[in-house]
Amino acid sequence: MFQLIFKKDRIISLFVWSFLSFSVIKCLSIFIYSFVNTFLYEAFLYSFLFFIYFFIVKVRFGSRLNYLHYITSSFLFVIGIIMFSYGYYKLVMLDNDYFNLNFFIAILISNLIFSSLLFLLTLIKRK
Amino acid sequence: MKFTIFFLAAGIILLSVAIVFDINYFNYKRPIPYSQFRKISFYDFKAFKRPDITLNGFKEFAYIKTNRRIHYLNNGNVEITTYFHPSRSYVFAQNIRDLDLLTHELYHFHISEYYTRLLRKEILGNPKNISDNMIIRLNKKYYEFENEMQLNYDEDTYHSYVMQEQKKWEIKIDSLLQSLESFSNPLIHIRSKE
């Protein structure tokens, strides 16, 4: 069932997309640094960026993701974000900087709710 | 393949921009140890300020980044030093002559050194049985205490704007540092193989 999603080129595409998303958010965080509850905006943006992956798959591989594949990809996307964030923390930040795991839980929840709603919209449009 | 390379390249470019705002590699200066704190001026605050960043509406502020490093020496001793990071610290304008603001920022550095001395004191209290993991755990614990004190300091003095509170804190921090003067040497003799 998951063979399709775990194909090498799809996994690479997903991780490259999560890397680009991580970089986009890091860059945007320079400008939204002073917002109240910045992490909520960031989690929301991550969900939106993940939703774009749905169309990347459609254009690149000529197939649509079903909901199960979509949610599984979403988990993998968040794992990618955690990996890149931890790498950034280890390589760039100092030991007394924050590495907030709660933030990644917020991204995961946001991905499950917001991205699912966006996925639902694509189904309605198709009908 | 083109997709992968294009997105990867775009990601690297964007990430490089983000990194420069965390640590200014274009104008890099090595971390300054606490022993040289008297030499620090606003010219040493070399990081890029984030665009349009304000402190509750005020544009005239500075940010200092400090931490402590633990070096495990070959002879079994440990060296714990507090550092100021010029390329991670910024000020709204480097050519300002605001001594009060500089003093406020330097007292953040003194607070860091105070907790470094407390860490040295605790390690020296049990030098034979202390392991590297225990030192890491203690360091984390003192970072938490330090963060709390740094926040209280900024809150009470309102980032140096409330002069009376600023003076109170200066006296307090000076006396705390003085009380731990005997732990001011970064080198700690433990498990020495000499």
Image (cartoon, grey):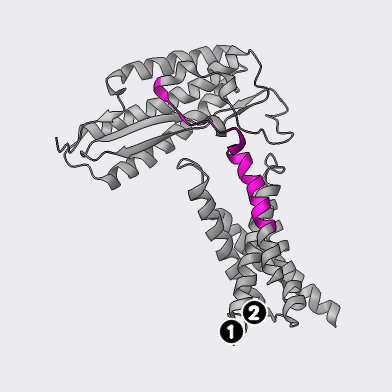
Answer yes or no: is residue A72 visible. Answer: no
Q: Do residues under tags 1 and 2 come within 8 Å of each other at their CB atoms?
A: yes
Q: CA distance from mark 1 to mark 2?
A: 7 Å
- Residue B184, located in which quarter of the rendered image? top left
Task: State which region is magenta.
Answer: B10-35
Q: Which residue is mark 2?
A: A69
Indicate the amino acid at tag 2. Answer: His
Residue B11 within the segment the image draws in magenta: yes
Reply above or below: A93 against B101.
Answer: below
Q: Which residue is located at x 69 percent, y 66 percent? A: A50
Q: Is A54 covered by the magenta stretch?
A: no
**Residue A77 drawn above or below residue B60:** below
| Residue B12 placement, left or right of B82 | right
Q: Quadrant of the N terminus of chain B?
A: bottom right
Q: Residue A2 has which mark?
A: 1
Residue at 63% in and 13% down: B98
Residue A91 locus on image (x, y percent) = 50, 48
Q: Can the viewer see residue A15 in this picture? A: yes
**What amino acid does circle 1 point to?**
Phe
Front in this rendered view, residue B163 or B127: B127
Q: Give coordinates of residue B23: x percent, y percent.
A: 57, 38
Residue farthest to the bottom, as pictured: A1
The foreground one among B127 and B37 is B37
